[in-house]
Image (tube, grey):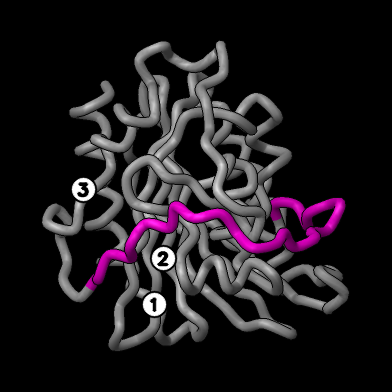
Amino acid sequence: MGDIKQRTWAIGAAITITVGCALSGCASSGNADTDRGEGTKTATATPSAHASMTESVLSEAVLTTAELPVGGWAEKPSSASASDGATSTDAEGPGACGADFSDELGEDLENTAQSGRDWTRESTGAYLNVGTFADPAAAEHVQAITNAVRGCPTEGSTFTIDGAEETIVTTVKDLGSWGSATYCGGFEARGATTVAGTTCMIAGDGFGVMVVVGAAFSFDVPKDAEVQQIVDAAYRKAAAQLG
């Protein structure tokens, strides 16, 4: 799945170089991890993470296809083979107003244990990712993301990403409350790439849960009611397995 900081950029903003990752899925089933075009990586838990939060343990806490509360989602197969070549990335991301939460998550999560699964919906081309990751400071990180996005301009912000100008709108959404802290927000990129969706991050006891849905066009993005069902199921399973 790649490190969690790259993950929030790759599936949160999902624009330009990362749009292929977002629309085709980056996270692999089970324990195999991929990032945005840089080949397969295996993350290891940092000393600050709970000792029991290994990738295999976290994998057991991720929803399976049979456990999804809504229909129409086809799980993407894992991708365990390394990429034939790496793709360059911008030295700096656009920040929280561009759905890049690297600053809020901090360097301590670069190599944290994590696991996730990806699905696509053939009828609309929408994608879904559900993941778990070890994070003793999950509540602090989730709250930092919420605070940052609340300060973003409602008309969006314009960034130059991979040489192309993109306008990205991020907004906080009230889809409910789970765990010790909840962030749910919408994102929409308008420019060289169009993509829209919803990201939710939930803080548990020593772990975090991430759910991302999106599509190339806003009218194909799964509705909030469906996202709520998936987030609820994802967090309940993770809490039962890891709490």
Do the residues bearing badges 2 and 3 touch, measured as CB atoms within 8 Å? Answer: no
Q: Residue at x 27, y 65 (%)?
A: 75
Q: CA distance from mark 1 to mark 3?
A: 19 Å
Q: Secondary structure at mark 3?
A: helix
- The picture places residue 67, in percent across and down from the top left corner, at 14, 53
Q: Depth-wise, is mark 1 or mark 3 nearer the camera?
A: 1
Is residue 71 shown left or right of residue 162?
A: left
Asked whether 84 falls inside the magenta stretch, the response is: yes
Mark 1 or mark 3: whose residue is earlier in sequence: 1
Magenta segment, which residues?
Answer: 73-96
Question: Which residue is labeled 1 in the image?
Answer: 126
Q: Residue at x 41, y 77 (%)?
A: 221
Q: What quarter of the picture does the C terminus occupy?
A: top left
Q: How many marks?
A: 3
Do the residues bearing badges 2 and 1 touch, measured as CB atoms within 8 Å? Answer: yes
As displayed, is residue 68 above or below residue 135?
Answer: below
Is residue 117 shown left or right of residue 9?
A: left
- The picture places residue 156, in percent across and down from the top left corner, at 72, 70
> Which of the 4 image quadrants contains residue 207?
top left
Question: Which residue is labeled 3 in the image?
Answer: 233
